[in-house]
Image (spheres, rainbow, N blue to C red):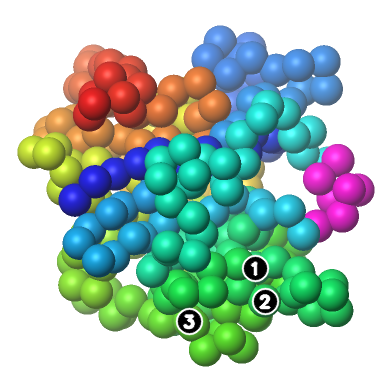
Amino acid sequence: MNLYPIEAGNFKLDGGAMFGVVPKTLWSRTNPADEHNMIDIAARCLLIEDGNRVILIDNGMGDKQTEKFFGYYYPWGNFNLDDSLAKSGFHRDDITDVFLTHLHFDHCGGSVQWNKDRTGYEPAFKNAVFWSNERHWKWATQPNRRERASFLPENILPMEESGQLKFVKDPVSDYTEADELNFGIFFVDGHTEKQMIPHIKYKGKTVVFMADLLPTAGHLPVPYVMGYDTRPLLTLPEKEKFLNAAADHNYYLFLEHDAHNQIITVKHTEKGVRLDECFTFDELFN
């Protein structure tokens, strides 16, 4: 097995929304804001090369939305999905599986693209199976008013219409082994229904793709919960349970949204679980 970090593009989000009820005087210590109160955000995906399987976890916003849409998110930097795949020696047609932690637009927008004459949409990974889970799919395709703007039909429905969509088996607990994909999944419901957090065994370490359970290193204190979470009182125990396990078992936390920290470890302290070390992917594995 080989792992590759894939940078699908950087953007910005409102710092207050990203930290919920936490005062700016606290969160700005780790995530400084610009003059518009926006903080740096990454769309960092993970590619797993495992035998004949090439599995991409999440894929960013994509590029099919309007200029007005992207203008809300202040894109910055030079990263994009295709160049990042090519840097690691891959093309999107090599992808056999696209695993989607959840179906918010900044995690799955790259799954679907315009067709050739821009009259409709088609899967952006023509040879891939798209993986979700049945309960989250229903949640996303029958969205509540709070999340409706994050679950865009053009990002989601073409995966099903193409016949390329599959669901991982229903979990019998909050953690299950996904035999179809050869990694474990921790299911959490605070951010959105049945978000999936992959746990990958790699070179003697457990690498955990954090998605929106831990957006950035600045979100380590348990009460630092995003305003985007639909059920923050569920996020609290889910996050606490996970972070205690991460400190106990020395998990390596792969941060999807932290533009300045790729991988971190955590440790127990008198104040709770806190940051231990920061690594780039290359420092850790190459």
Dot 1 or dot 2: first in sequence order is 1
Q: Looking at the rendering, in which quadrant would you find the C terminus?
A: top left
68 part of magenta stretch? yes
Residue 174 pos. (x, y %): 26, 63
Dot 2 or dot 3: first in sequence order is 2
Q: Amino acid at mark 2?
A: Glu
Q: Amino acid at mark 1?
A: Val
Q: Which mark is residue 112?
A: 1
User: Is residue 52 or residue 241 the one in the foreground?
Assistant: 52
Secondary element at tag 3: strand
Residue at the extreme left: 204
Dot 1 or dot 3: first in sequence order is 1
Asked if the residue under mark 3 is in contact with the one under mark 2, i.e. CB atoms within 8 Å, the reply is no
In the image, the segment drawn in magenta is 65-71
Q: On screen, 40 above or below 251?
A: above
User: Is residue 188 or residue 102 the one in the foreground?
Assistant: 102
Residue 172 pos. (x, y %): 22, 76
Pointer 2: what residue? 122
Q: Amino acid at mark 3?
A: Leu
Asked if the residue under mark 2 is in contact with the one under mark 1, i.e. CB atoms within 8 Å, the reply is yes
24 part of magenta stretch? no
Seen in the image, is 17 located left or right of residue 163? right
Residue 117 pos. (x, y %): 84, 75
Secondary element at tag 1: strand
Q: Which mark is residue 165?
A: 3
Q: For residue 144, say whether it is visible.
A: no
Residue found 65% across the figure and 80% down from its top: 157
Q: On screen, 137 above or below 195?
A: below
Dominant secondary structure, magenta:
helix
Q: How busy is the neighbourhood of tag 1: few (under 14 within 10 Å), some, or many (20 plus)?
A: many
Asked if the residue under mark 3 is in contact with the one under mark 1, i.e. CB atoms within 8 Å, the reply is no
Residue found 67% across the figure and 54% down from its top: 62
